[in-house]
Every structure is written in C-alpha cells, then in structure tokens.
Image: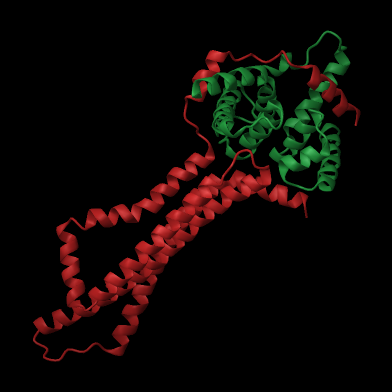
Chain colours: A green, B red
Amino acid sequence: MSETLEQSFVKQLKQNQNIVHKICRLYTTDSDAHNDLFQEITIQLWKAFPKFRGESKFSTWAYRVALNTAITLYRKNSRAVNTVTYEAQKHFFVQDEYNLEEEERIKLMYQAVQQLNDIEKALVFMYLEDKDYTEIAETLGISEVNARVKMNRIKGKLVKILNP
Amino acid sequence: MEELDLLKKAWQKDNHSFEQVTEKDIYKMIHKRSTSIVKWIFYISLLELGFGFILNIVMSFTKYDTESLELLKKWNLYNYYIGLSIIVYVVVFYFIYRFYKMYKSISVVDNTKNLLSTILKTRKVVKQYVIFNLITFALIFAVIFSYGFYYGYMDIMIKKGVVHPEISAKAICVSLLIITLITSFVTFLFWLFYRLLYGILLRRLNRNYSELKKIDL
C-alpha cells in the first residue's frame, strides 16, 4: 500500500516539478540554495501527501505547500549572498522567438521581482501562474479585495524599482 | 504594466530550462530529514521543556540533593518544597500537552497566514513556559538565598558566643536588596539569552506574518 503511495507521489511530483523549480528560483539566489529548498519542499509535500485526496489538482495542491515552505518553513542559508547574478538565469528566458530588446526587459523585470519581499513574491508568483484573486486570497489567507489592492501596490513598487 | 505581462508570457512558456530531477532523485529526497524552521523550533522547545525535568531527576540521585533536602527540613521549608514541586510538575505537563496539541495543528496545507500564526502560537506556549520557569526560579532562588543568609548569619553569631543573636533591620534591608539585585540580574541574563535565540529564529516568520496582517488592515 505505502509502496504504491510512494510511487504515485514520485510520479506526480516528477511531472509537476517545474512548479517547485519556479518557486525555488524566485526565493533563492544560487543553485545550492535552490536545491536545498527543492529538497525541503519535496519532504513537506511527501509528509502532507497521505492527506491529499485528489479534490484539487496535484499541481494546485503542490504549489500551495511549496509556497508555504518557501515563505515559512525554509531556513535561508545565511551564507548565501543576496545577488541576482544567478547563473542559471542567463538561460532562463532565452527563447528563439524573443527579440533581444524584449529579452532584456524581461530579465530586468525578473530582477526587480527578486527584490520584493517574501509575501510580495508569493503574490507575483501566483499572478504569473495566472491564478485568479480568489485563489490568491485563499492561499495566503487574506481577503480578495485586499489581494487586488496589494497586487496593484506591488506593480507600483516594481515600476519604481525599474525606474529609480 | 507591460513588463510584468511580458514576464508572465515568458514565465508560462518557460518550462524546460530547469535541470529536471529524476524519479530516483525524488525517492532519495523523501527519505531525507526535514531541516525546516518548525523542526528547529520543535527540538529547541523539547530541550526547554525537558531540561528542568531531566535536571530534577538527575539531581535527585545525588548526595547534594539529600543534603539540600536536610537543609530544607531544618529550615521548615520541606512541605512548601513538596507543594511547589507538585505544582511545577502539573504545570510542566500542562505545557507539554498544550505544546504537543499546537505542534500537531501546524499544517503545511493551511493558508499561509494561518500557518504562520499557528507556528508563532506554538512558540508562544513555550515562551509562557519559560516565563513560568523564570519566575519560579527567581522565587526559589530568592527564598533559598534569604534563608541561607539568615541561618548562616545566626550560625556564625552562635559560634562567636552570642547567646541570642539578632539581625539589625538595616542588615535585613541591605541583604534583601542584594538578593533582589542578584536574582533580577540572573533572571535578566536568561531572558536576554531567550530574546536573542528566538529573535534570530523567528525573525523571518514574524516579518512575514506582520506583512500579511498589514495587507488586511
């Protein structure tokens, strides 16, 4: 029984691992920390998995646990220096269909997002994942109206970071 | 905001730039131990809850303990000591029970605000326990010190040949002041230690929690 549980978990996480990777990238600044956080999220997901009944999609359930782990449970490595020169980032959005100028703007925007605090990052993450405000509010435990207000403020803050 | 929407477009397309973990990696990961902050808080709290308890048990097997019990009997404090011990044990068990209940209710699938709040409340239980301990400690420390001082003084006087030794009011005042100062100082040191320890440990949790609360203000 527990064997099949483990198998089913591993399979689903493997399929949905990019969600976890995206959160790790947003909340860490180097690949060691990225792997560390990935590991911790995996453990938390696994611990919570027996209670996952499949009422929601695995991915929806997983990003909630992953976000919570990043925001509350994960102990940041104090040695990690807070820079945005993330090696992997160079390859992040490089895709053929972008022109160079657009690519540069996306990169700058991403760097701006990385300067936000933990909670703001969570909102932006869900915004980028195209979640609606009902879900954003529910995940963070705030009201929907205030989630909207906060998101608008974050946009303002990002403009300021980009145009100091 | 155009830039953010550009990022959003790129974000949703970008699925292949991550180094993929294999099923074997995931198997390995789920058998590792969590290093989450909750684990840290749990172990430190266990230490705190258990420390006085273990110290008590260890001490009760030593010669030192028998001697101090004799002393307590001589000072007519023995019954108070037993009474206080019972109260302390009851309170300790109450705290352990509450801590366990709170700890169990920490759920990573809860919403973020509730999760943070539960973790911080769990910490609060231990904090109350520590405050209780500090107060009991200060009380016992002050009483034992006062009695020790009083009887010690009397012994010296009797040895010196004074038949009915008495302590002047001034000496009592001064010694009480000294005892209060020392007790406050030692208690303060403990308090400072806790402030530092949990200040560091809970800084991020507190910051994120207040950020979430601020959104709903």
| Residue A59: x %, y % from top left | 70, 26
Q: Is residue B17 left or right of residue B196?
A: right
Vertical relation: A8 (above or below) B212 = above
Question: Which residue sits at x=47%, y=24%?
Answer: B31
Image position, residue B196 (x, y; %): 50, 51
Residue A127 figure quarter: top right
Q: Position of residue A33 (x, y in %)?
A: 58, 26
Write the residue at 38% across / 74% down. Answer: B180
* B29, above or below B139, in the image: above
> At x 86% / y 13%, what residue is drawn?
A100
Q: Residue furthest front?
A: A1
Q: Is residue B141 visible?
A: no
Residue with the most extreme right position: B2
Q: Which quadrant of the view contains residue B74?
A: bottom left
Considering depth in this image, is A23 or A43 the residue closer to the camera?
A: A43
- Residue at x-position 83% and y-position 19%: A104
Q: Is residue A82 visible?
A: yes
B66 lies left or right of A134: left
Residue B210 in picture, x, y percent from top left: 68, 51
Q: Going by the picture, which residue comes out furthest to the bottom?
A: B164
Question: Which quadrant, please, contains the C terminus of chain A?
Answer: top right
